[in-house]
Amino acid sequence: AFGPYTDECIAALLPLLRYQYSAEVRCAVAQALDPVFESACEYSVNTTHLSNLSVPQTFFPPIVMGISEQLLEEENDDEITLALSEAMSNITYYAFIHTKTGTRSCMTCIEAKQFVSTVVKVYETCLKRRKHIMQKMLTENLDTDQIVEHSHFMDIQSEILT
């Protein structure tokens, strides 16, 4: 089982969320953290080894904060933003469903406030972009290709919001 190695894996991947030279690296790291965090959660619920009980607790806040902050910086790349938002959604879901007394993935009130504020900013940015495209679609005389392109953009933005 991969469970015993999740803490080292997460610790190695976490700094790469902010890797400034490649959006693809940041995206791949977020997508890799998704199943690794799920493994950590599953292992912490099913193990009796005390050192592994705290892995989800320790890494949940920095993972979701790192991804949410990166979402703000990746606002012009829809594919990267979509991958980051999907990974963040999955990780928060795993934290929620894999609970056992003493093994919950928690945040302090300050961390939670910061996380929610960052996510609200991401939503705000996404909604502003959608509004701009919708106004463009309603007011400009667009050809079929432009309508398809804008509709695709709206679909991606919709996925990001969910």
Image (cartoon, rainbow, N blue to C red):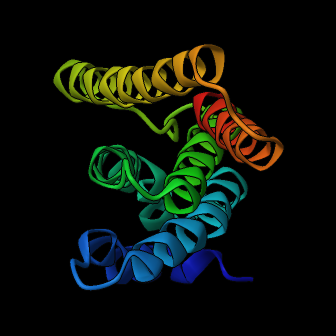
Look at the picture and state if 22 lies above or below 46: below
- Residue at position x 24%, y 19% in the image: 113
Q: Quadrant of residue 115?
A: top left
- Residue at position x 62%, y 54% in the image: 41
- Horizontal placement of 31 versus 102: left or right? right
- Horizontal placement of 3 versus 105: left or right? right
Q: x%, y% of residue 160? A: 60, 37
- Residue at position x 49%, y 70% in the image: 27
Q: Locate the N terminus and report the quarter of the image it occupies.
A: bottom right
Q: Give the camera-side residue of 142 and 75.
A: 142
- Residue at position x 76%, y 40% in the image: 143
Q: x%, y% of residue 88? A: 53, 46
Q: x%, y% of residue 155? A: 73, 37
What is the residue that sits farthest to the left in this orientation?
Answer: 110
Q: Give the camera-side residue of 43 and 158.
A: 158
Q: x%, y% of residue 117? A: 26, 21
Q: Give the camera-side residue of 156 and 149.
A: 149
Q: Give the camera-side residue of 27 and 6.
A: 27
Look at the picture and state if 102 lies above or below 112: below
Counting labels gives: 0
- Horizontal placement of 52 versus 96: left or right? left
Q: Locate the C terminus and report the quarter of the image it occupies.
A: top right
Look at the picture and state if 67 lies above or below 96: below
